[in-house]
Image (spheres, coloured by chain):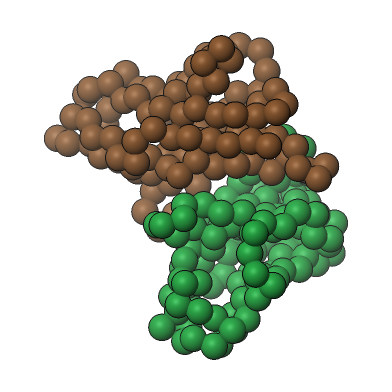
Chain colours: A green, B brown
Amino acid sequence: KAGVTQTPRYLIKTRGQQVTLSCSPISGHRSVSWYQQTPGQGLQFLFEYFSETQRNKGNFPGRFSGRQFSNSRSEMNVSTLELGDSALYLCASRPDRGRNEQFFGPGTRLTVL
Amino acid sequence: AQSVTQLGSHVSVSEGALVLLRCNYSSSVPPYLFWYVQYPNQGLQLLLKYTTGATLVKGINGFEAEFKKSETSFHLTKPSAHMSDAAEYFCAVSGASGGSYIPTFGRGTSLIVHP
């Protein structure tokens, strides 16, 4: 099976712009989670989608949003970018919402100038 | 509620030496525990996991971890470090949140291997 794919791999934006990141989970996986990784804060949970519905949300402002499509592919959007949004954004998928491990994509490196 | 503490943000060993990365957790339910490895500019890759049963878990690349309930620990070890083991290692615990088991990750430990 193909792994989790994320596009684009690298992105440079300026403050105030918005950005959309894409994630394709492993075939058959219905749960998709997003994480923000920074040197200062480590790995922080953004949100989880399952069956096109947001099931859990981390402690991030409303500028961070996401959605999931019927084929389980997911997108996350960040509006009004701030310098502090510069991070590696990781997508992870798993078959369902159980206690199994997550499978991570390579991430999208977002730099906000 | 659940949490993970990884002791030591950096661990330095010589090639061929024992690797020991420490992880302590707290969980309100019997925990599922995971160790992941992350190489530069890559995502996280699962090394091993503990669910139930045998407390000594073997993973990929010669790593293993032991679940000790009394100590709430899940330390990662490898008998002999290799240069290719240099990476960031994350411990995670899976508990319940709103009907979904979202894992909580530790801050990570950077393993440095000297020749």
Residue B50: which quarter of the image?
A: top right
Of B115 and A39, the residue lying toward us: A39
Q: Is residue A105 above or below residue B88?
A: below
Quadrant location of the N terminus of chain B? top right
Residue B31: which quarter of the image?
A: top right
Locate residue A81 relative to residue A51 in the image: left or right. Answer: left
Q: Position of residue A12 (x, y in %)?
A: 45, 80
User: Residue drawn 38% across and 29% down?
Assistant: B21
Q: Position of residue A83 (x, y in %)?
A: 45, 77
Residue B88: which quarter of the image?
A: top left
* Residue B109 can be seen in this image: yes
Of A58 and B76, the residue lying toward us: A58
User: Residue drawn 65% across and 59% down?
Assistant: A59
Quadrant location of the C terminus of chain B? top left
Q: Position of residue A6 (x, y in %)?
A: 58, 64
Of B30 and B63, the residue lying toward us: B30
* Residue A25 can be seen in this image: no
Question: Disc count in the image?
Answer: 0
